[in-house]
Image: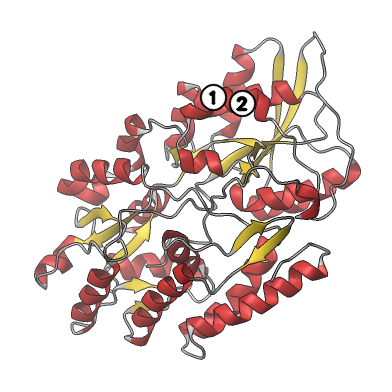
Amino acid sequence: MNSISPRRRVVHAAVAGLALTGLLTACGGSGSGDSSSSGPVTLPFWGWANGQEAVVKAFNASHKDIKLKYTKVTDQLTMQKQLTNAVKAGNAPCLVQNTAEYVTTWVSQGALADITRYVEADKDKFNAGAWAGAQVQGKVYGVPTSSAPAFTIYRTDIFQKYGLKAPSTWDDFIAAGKVLKKHGIKLTNYAGEDPSTLEVLAMQAGAHWYSIDGNAWKVNFQDTGTLKAAQTIQEIIDNDLNSKLSFADYAAVQRNYDQGGTATRQISTWQMAGMVQNFTKSNGKWALSPWPTFKGEAAKTPAGTNQSGGLTLVAKQCKNQEQAAQAALWMSTDTGAVKTMASPATGNGVMPALADSGSYVAEAISDKLLGDNYEPGKKIVTDSLNTVTGDWTFGPDWTAMFTEMQSGWAKVINKDQKVTDLLAHMQEWTVGDLKSRGISVKN
């Protein structure tokens, strides 16, 4: 299932009506308010996604009073380091590409501007899951750029050969895996370095690893939803239904799928481009089906990926926050800009964050890969955008927590420990980590 990989996902919900000061580390930096400058302003914009330079060029050509100055950063992790240094030096760019998992951390450090009053009127232009990713405690710190429809892709020829139907529930998914196992085929792939599978299934099951209780953070890696997700994953591992291919050799992962070694993936649209580029034998043999549900529950899909749940954030140190918010809105809503970014050829091939993304679905999925299943696949993608989780909160130490979880996940995949063992460890570790950072935690 390798969930939404390589690396991982996003979305993060607002918790209204609480003061940040007791929940996060002390906010630093004075930041500047809006400038009432009547002349043209230049807004530095840092990002890493393909297509942004073309979007900036289009923006500058169509705006006289606001200009963007674009700097391309190597990748997402490099961005975090460079932004940290810029904030400390007092020269952060006005606009920053990022993903929702980092928003709480940046707010806790006083790095982001509250732009709610500038963008709230445009809220309905975006899908709820993507909009939630821009918020912390009901305040908006950026504008969504992309969203992550989530669904299953599976080998129709293999499923038909062994009399299987597309699994609608996780129970069906596991049952299909047991049939495939008899014929030497793996159901899904769990990379030992990528615990995002646990994250997204917990998210779908209604878990809340981080939440706010009064003026403190509450940590819970052992709630009902997480344990439900853990049971599903453990059954797949215990029955040897998963491959163990590392994303470090992504070409090998692609070959395995292409050659029929593994029959399904739970993915978003952007991964399909890699499949098309690497597959030589199985194009036209794949189909999409909805993300499996937990038995008896309504459709619900996890939110986002590091590639897909994107945002343009506004820095607190920006002297022209209102203009920055306007520029961010334009990049996420202008038809030409959105098409540039949505296309795998001109942009990064992700779905826009707009409420009505239907007109972009045809470009985001591949008729070459899906063949006769291309037309019905468009509806699967469109429907999934309406079931995205909107109540997941990323904690202020998310990056450190995920790194710790990675090492434990490898042991889970190798059957050196159970998923529940990892969760017990993460509960203790995360509480301790937050306390070590001076962040209030309520056990």
Helix, strand or loop for disc 1: helix
**Depth check, front residue: 227 or 9:** 227
**Residue appearing at x 56%, y 22% in the figure:** 121
Q: Is residue 344 above or below residue 125?
A: below
In-image side of 316 versus 17 (left or right) = right
Disc 1 + disc 2, Cβ < 8 Å: yes
Q: Position of residue 21 (x, y in %)?
A: 81, 49
**Residue 76, numbered label:** none
In-image side of 247 versus 156 (left or right) = right
Q: CA distance from mark 1 to mark 2?
A: 5 Å
Snapshot quadrant of residue 253:
bottom left
Q: Is residue 398 above or below residue 348?
A: below
Question: Identity of the amino acid at label 2?
Answer: Val
Q: Which residue is mark 2?
A: 119
**Residue appearing at x 59%, y 12% in the figure:** 62
Q: Quadrant of the N terminus?
A: bottom left
Q: Position of residue 344 (x, y in %)?
A: 42, 40
**Residue appearing at x 26%, y 46% in the figure:** 380
Q: Is residue 91 above or below residue 165?
A: above
Q: Which residue is mark 1?
A: 122
Q: Position of residue 217 (x, y in %)?
A: 69, 61
